[in-house]
């Protein structure tokens, strides 16, 4: 929804956008397929994926191991910026990968600005549970890791925090906030903003609504509540997102989260293995069914072979009888040839 808002502000999102899915995002994901593919490859290279909670803080994204990936990113950015002077992309994987992308932007001399979309963690948890069957605690940590990485890595750069519910409530106001950060005159895109608000947005797209203080204490630790409260204040412009005090507070929250980094990395590796369990279970069930079918087929073949053997034995016995009868017939003929009358009869038979 926020990405489509960027489009309303004249930001080009590319022409290779992921197709809509009526089961999840019926109006589209607004994600560039090439960039998502590269991000997936980056995560896979460090034994992670989109639903992994590891912070990836120790990865050397500027190292030689990622030279090919950086070259690919440069080519993607060059192609997109040749198409339009102002290009933007949205991918939920990006917050943990911002050091990689910011290195690419710096090398290419690209001016970067950020729109950080936030939503109540319980809504995010509900969404991930419904779509992917993720555990409540895992989904909560995913929300926290991505939010704090986004806030910390964009420090000192043009940025705005946009709350999902605020955007539904007053799209013109929120798009105006986005336009100011992107240095887009709202008057220049007034028609696009009106079309976005009247034709694209719909409360029916929102499947859960939670008040700001609605928490499940068993699933949401105090750190989560503090991070959400800060995000809400930034989304309402109650605090200056660029103020030194806010940056200090973001760093403090990130440091508290980073204490759990080794555990998050371990959990991430366990999750990667656990995510394979359903596939392996399915393959095991298939193998067992195939084995049972093969065993049954083998038994049927065994029965057919037994029948064939009995038939073969019967034919062999019949052949043996015929051989004995033939030997006996030859004996009779031999005796007939030894007698004059017999020879006469045999010659008569041969002439006939």
Image (tube, rainbow, N blue to C red):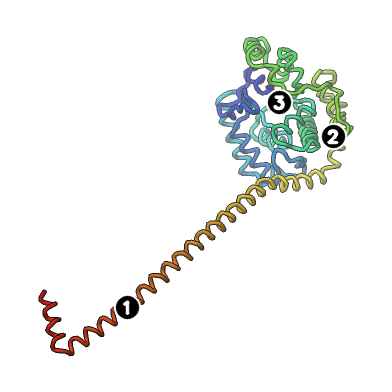
Residue labelled with disc 1: 323
Q: Earlier in the sequence, mark 3 or mark 1?
A: 3
Q: Counting other residues with Cα less than 10 Å from the Cα at mark 3, is it few (<14), some (14-19), or many (20 or more)?
A: some
At which x and y percent is residue 87?
62, 25
On screen, 221 above or below 26?
Answer: below
Q: Residue at x 71, y 25 (%)?
A: 113
Residues at circles 3 and 1 in contact by the CB criterion of under 8 Å: no
On screen, 230 above or below 323?
Answer: above
On screen, 187 above or below 257?
Answer: above
At which x and y percent is residue 34?
59, 34
**Separation of residues labelled 3 and 2 (CA atoms):** 33 Å
**Separation of residues labelled 1 and 2 (CA atoms):** 89 Å
Q: Secondary structure at mark 1?
A: helix
Q: Secondary structure at mark 2?
A: loop
Residue at the extreme front: 341
Q: Nearer the viewer, mark 3 or mark 2?
A: 2
**Separation of residues labelled 3 and 1 (CA atoms):** 99 Å
Q: Residue at x 62, y 10 (%)?
A: 191
Q: Earlier in the sequence, mark 3 or mark 2?
A: 3
Residue labelled with disc 2: 219
Q: Nearer the viewer, mark 3 or mark 1?
A: 1
The foreground one among 33 and 301 is: 301
In the rendered structure, find residue 113 and report the number of the disc placed on it: 3
Quarter of the rendering containing residue 241: top right
Q: Nearer the viewer, mark 1 or mark 2?
A: 1
């Amino acid at each position: 929804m926020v990405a489509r808002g960027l489009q309303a502000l004249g930001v080009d999102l590319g022409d290779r956008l992921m197709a809509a899915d009526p089961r999840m995002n019926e109006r589209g994901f607004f994600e560039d397929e090439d960039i998502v593919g590269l991000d997936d490859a980056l995560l896979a290279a460090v034994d992670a994926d989109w639903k992994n909670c590891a912070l990836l803080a120790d990865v050397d994204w500027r190292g030689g191991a990622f030279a090919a990936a950086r070259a690919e990113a440069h080519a993607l950015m060059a192609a997109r910026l040749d198409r339009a002077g102002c290009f933007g992309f949205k991918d939920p994987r990006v917050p943990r990968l911002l050091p990689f992308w910011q290195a690419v932007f710096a090398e290419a001399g690209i001016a970067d600005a950020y729109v950080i979309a936030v939503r109540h963690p319980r809504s995010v948890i509900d969404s991930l549970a419904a779509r992917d069957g993720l555990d409540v605690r895992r989904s909560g940590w995913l929300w926290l890791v991505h939010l704090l990485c986004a806030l910390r890595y964009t420090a000192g750069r043009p940025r705005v925090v946009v709350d999902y519910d605020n955007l539904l409530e007053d799209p013109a106001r929120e798009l105006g906030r986005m336009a100011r950060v992107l240095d887009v005159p709202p008057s220049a895109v007034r028609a696009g903003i009106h079309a976005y608000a009247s034709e694209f947005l719909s409360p029916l797209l929102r499947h859960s609504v939670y008040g700001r203080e609605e928490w499940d204490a068993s699933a949401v630790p105090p750190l989560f509540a503090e991070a959400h409260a800060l995000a809400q204040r930034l989304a309402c412009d109650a605090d200056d997102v660029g103020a030194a005090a806010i940056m200090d507070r973001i760093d403090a929250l990130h440091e508290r989260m980073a204490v759990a980094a080794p555990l998050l990395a371990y959990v991430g590796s366990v999750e990667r293995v656990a995510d394979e369990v359903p596939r392996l279970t399915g393959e095991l069930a298939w193998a067992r069914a195939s084995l049972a079918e093969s065993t049954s087929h083998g038994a049927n073949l065994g029965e057919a072979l037994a029948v064939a053997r009995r038939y073969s034995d019967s034919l062999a016995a019949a052949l043996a009888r015929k051989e004995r009868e033939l030997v006996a017939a030859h004996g009779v003929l031999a005796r007939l040839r030894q007698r004059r009358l017999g020879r006469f009869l045999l010659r008569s038979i041969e002439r006939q």
